[in-house]
Image: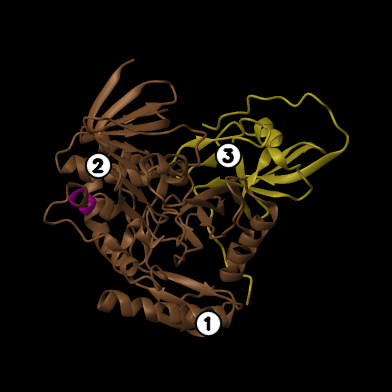
Amino acid sequence: MKTDSRFKTLIKSTNDVNFTLFGEIVTVPKGTTLAAAILSNFGEASRITETGALRTAFCMMGVCFDCLVEVDGNPNIQSCMVLVHDQMVVKRQIGLRSIGISKDD
Amino acid sequence: MLNNQSEIAIIGGGVVGLSVAIGLLQSGHKVIVCDGEDSDARASFGNFGLVWGQGKGWNFAPYAKLTVDAIAAWEDFSKNLNDLSGLDVSLDQNGGFEFFTDPDKLNNFISMLEIQKGHAGNRFNYEALSGDELRNQIPGIGSKVVGATFSQLDGHINPLRFLRALRRAVKVLGGQIKSNASVKKITSNKDGGFSLILANGSVTSSEKVILCAGLGAIKLADQLAFKTNIRPERGELLITEKLGDQLPFISSTIRQVDEGGIQIGGTHADVGMDDNETLDIMVDLARHAVEIYPALSNVRVLRAWGALRVMSPDGYPVYAQSEEYPGAYLITCHSGVTLASLHASILSDWIENNVRAPNLEAFNENRF
């Protein structure tokens, strides 16, 4: 069973942005941090650590690193430190990120 | 005041002091380790974890030999440590690189290794690789790398877990580690032995005293009539976020900790006891890492710090007995991790002065 969000968005906005959160299209007021958007739309873990522990946004101020997600293909983004933008694609951060491919040659 | 009595007192609870303690405890001695304060310059908390040979002792044959002995003894040492502490320090001795972006520096280093090889006989060897050979062997090495040297003896451990394992092993062997035990004054007693007066006023007495206090020895060495001038040398380090895949090499400036983060370092600065990190060096370190392995360009740096190396005047270890105060020893070195395997074994023979004692005369203070 899917866990519903425990948070409610109080501000009604006429200026919304749409983005893809864990495979679903979500609408939030412009200026919302990604962590707030996650908490208000999703009640489950947004991250699974390397050891299998479930995590989601916690400190909301860039300190705890529990809110890491993948944003537009970039891993380990602190969702509390970025604002949602239109067409953003957010995936869960599962385990450790990889080094990636060399851009040099 | 409580007077603590022990056979051997070791001043310094870092990698060197604890390693020496393990060897002495395993030879049956009663040992107390006086560990200083958190505010001390603790090289053991800031190091790079290399078990490394390349370049070591190229212009001082005894050090070249000591280093190959130490590297060879590490496998047994890490097993011993694991048995004692229950901690695996993740020893990896699958070989390491020194990368170069300047052909002159590469050629200079090759000449040094050639001399080092002469000192250590067939026990040390290396390969020199051109940039293209290297890129064939390790895809992803940057185009600015003109070449590298490789020694199959080189490797690393997890340095913080190592420190924890040493502390645990000392306790398991019955050694006493006294924390916040900053030694302010050492006096030799009329009837033999030493008294160590701590900052809190308490006194620890012992038959022998071994000074392994790293930069802390600067203030204590002359109290035991040692004449080595120890000096700090700052190195700065970066560590990245943890990565799920393995970096395909170790070098003396770029290595991946077994937990996933990549440590970048290898700078040298003469700035006294200042262990702050600096922005321009951080930038240089990051640029260096990306030049060697461009895929690191989008990896985040999480922390940066400075740490102070413990340097003797010529950079080589000092193993000295005080002529004026028999029973007092000075042990100081820069490569406390690499040499730990020997510090935890043959140094107890040297302190006992028994028939198995290694000849460490080349490392006494007469050379200064």
Front tag of 1 and 2: 2
Q: Nearer the viewer, residue A39 or B162?
A: B162
| Residue matched to label 1 | B131
Q: Colour of chain A?
A: yellow
Q: Nearer the viewer, residue B23 or B83?
A: B23
Q: Nearer the viewer, residue A5 or B65?
A: B65
Which chain is tinted brown? B
| Residue matched to label 2 | B327
Q: Residue at x 41, y 60 (%)?
A: B368
Looking at the image, residue B344 lies above or below residue B5: below
* Percent x, y of residue B98: 47, 71
* Percent x, y of residue B22: 24, 43
Q: Residue at x 21, y 54 (%)?
A: B346
In the visual, does B189 lie left or right of A32? left
Magenta residues? B345-349
Looking at the image, residue A27 lies above or below residue B66: above
| Residue matched to label 3 | A46
Specify whether residue B347 is painted magenta. Answer: yes
Front tag of 2 and 3: 2
